[in-house]
Amino acid sequence: MTDKAAIRFQGARVVYPNGAVGLAGVDLDIKPGEFVVVVGSSGAGKSTLLRSVNGLTPLTSGSITVGGQPVPKKEGRELRRLRAGVGMIFQDFRITRRLSVMTNVLVGRVAHVPGWRAMLNLWPAADREIAFRALERVSIADKAWVRAGDLSGGQQQRVGIARALAQEPAIILADEPVASLDPVTTHQIMRDLVRINQELGITTLVNLHFLDLARRYGQRIIGLKAGELVYDGTADSVTQADFKNIYGRDPDAGDLLDESEAS
Amino acid sequence: MNEASRAAPGRPLRPARNWTLIIAAVGAVSLMTWWSARGIGFSLVELACNLPGGRRLLVESWPPDWSFFPRLLGPLLETLQIAVVGTVIGGILAIPIAVLAARNLTPGFLVWFVDRNFMNILRTLPDLFWAMLFAAAVGFGPIAGALALTVFTIAVISKLWSESLEAIDMAVPEAVRAAGGSWLAMLQFGAIPQALPHYVSYALYAFELNVRASMILGLVGAGGIGMVLETQRSTFEYPRVTLIVLSVLVLVLIIEKISESIRRRLV
């Protein structure tokens, strides 16, 4: 019950200052080691759902527990400790282009080393080793000393994944990780995420726009619509009618990656 | 523009000029200039009458007294050293001041408010004021000059750089926080790298200003070439004054060229 990798949403509600509802009271249990894909049209609350897990977006009401510990609503030491065990991957990579790949990955270790060591770039050998292994896991260890901004989009996203892995997290949150990538790279990155989930048993939540990707790579699919949970089931059992319910319309070619690639 | 193109259908007509506004503006500026010139007793007639005096000064100042040059080297070097010390110390102190004054990075409103006002006060008071203040506090000489330029450098860099910092993309700093990073880690790995080229560029710019300023600072006793200039001018050694002005001109030009070529490669 106190497994570090479990996530529990209870009446989780987020209302933004402008009145927009991000989450309209979500109850949801994520079991350790699950690979969950979250689908929904834009504005349905997919990002809010992920960002509330590591407190980037605080809940207005309700609660979220990660490994039995409630997510603190205020910035501070406790929230930082929780975030240290939760890796996050972003649509726009969010790596520092001007710094080396290695430094970017070591950012995944900042919460694990004393502040002065990070400040002076005196990372312990053990942490450098963790960073290197993270790079090897996504096959870009040869780029360790290259300026991150000089890499291709797919490689930059791998740096983002390696940074998350360097945290040695119990949970990975991936917010539209393939939305800025071409179809070939998209499949590579999705396979990386699935492989990491299987090999390391890291609980993974992925937001995706494309339905075929969701069905192909997800174990469990969660559908959000206007901040509410409208679907929760296995990837095998999801039907066209379910998608219609989630999106409020029939899915078309634009919702399928491989279709839009062909057109 | 010919009639045909003006009359072509579908083309907007050139809007009529607002002549009243133009006349009022020109009138207001003329009036203000006349009032100010009268106030300071500025008159073209008097200026023309005094021209021979100016000519005499120019004739007396030429040619420069080249034999004086060896005695300038020391003070010139000191001027440069004052500028270096002021730029480096001021440049370092400007970093936290700029960060706290950037709205997107500051840890709290109160810190931001105090820091912002502190910055504004530094900038409002001129470098000559600081030079006189420090000369009174630590005595006449290069240390007073270096301290004055330190304050001046903080004022220049912190203002410009805090604006660069406010313009950075906050997505990357957020990713550092998402990894459990502290405020300092967010600054170091997410925020500052994005604005680092701007910082170097502003520091070089401040150095250029400082070399120039350290000549003026000498006039109030803050060391460097300006002090020599003041002594020679007050004893009417105009050929030497010419030499001093020329050598400062060359020094400033050299520094500017080097600094500019580095800055162009940065941003």
Image: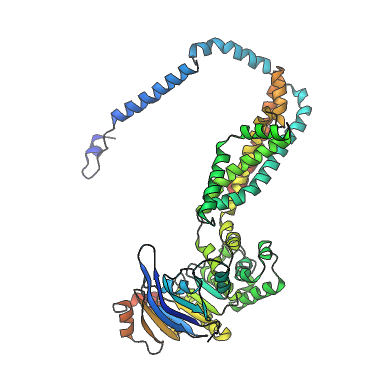
In this rendering, does residue A230 appear at all? yes
Q: Which quarter of the image is occupied by the C terminus of chain A? A: bottom left
Work out whether B209 lies above or below A39. above
- Give B30 or B104, whichever is nearer the viewer: B104
- Give B113 or B94, whichever is nearer the viewer: B113
Q: Quadrant of residue B26?
A: top left
In this rendering, does residue A212 appear at all? no
Measured as percent of width and height from the top left, residue B143 is found at: 73, 37
Work out whether B262 lies above or below A56. above
Q: Quadrant of residue A141?
A: bottom right
**Colour treatment of the image:** rainbow
Measured as percent of width and height from the top left, residue A247 is found at: 32, 77
Q: Residue at x 64, y 77 (%)?
A: A133
Q: Does residue A128 appear to the left or right of B67 in the view shown?
A: left
Q: Residue at x 66, y 62 (%)?
A: A119
Q: Does residue B85 appear to the left or right of A87 in the view shown?
A: right
Measured as percent of width and height from the top left, residue A19 is found at: 35, 64
Q: Quadrant of residue A169?
A: bottom right
Measured as percent of width and height from the top left, residue B155 is found at: 59, 42
Q: Residue at x 62, y 32 (%)?
A: B128
Q: Does residue B139 appear to the left or right of B175 in the view shown?
A: right
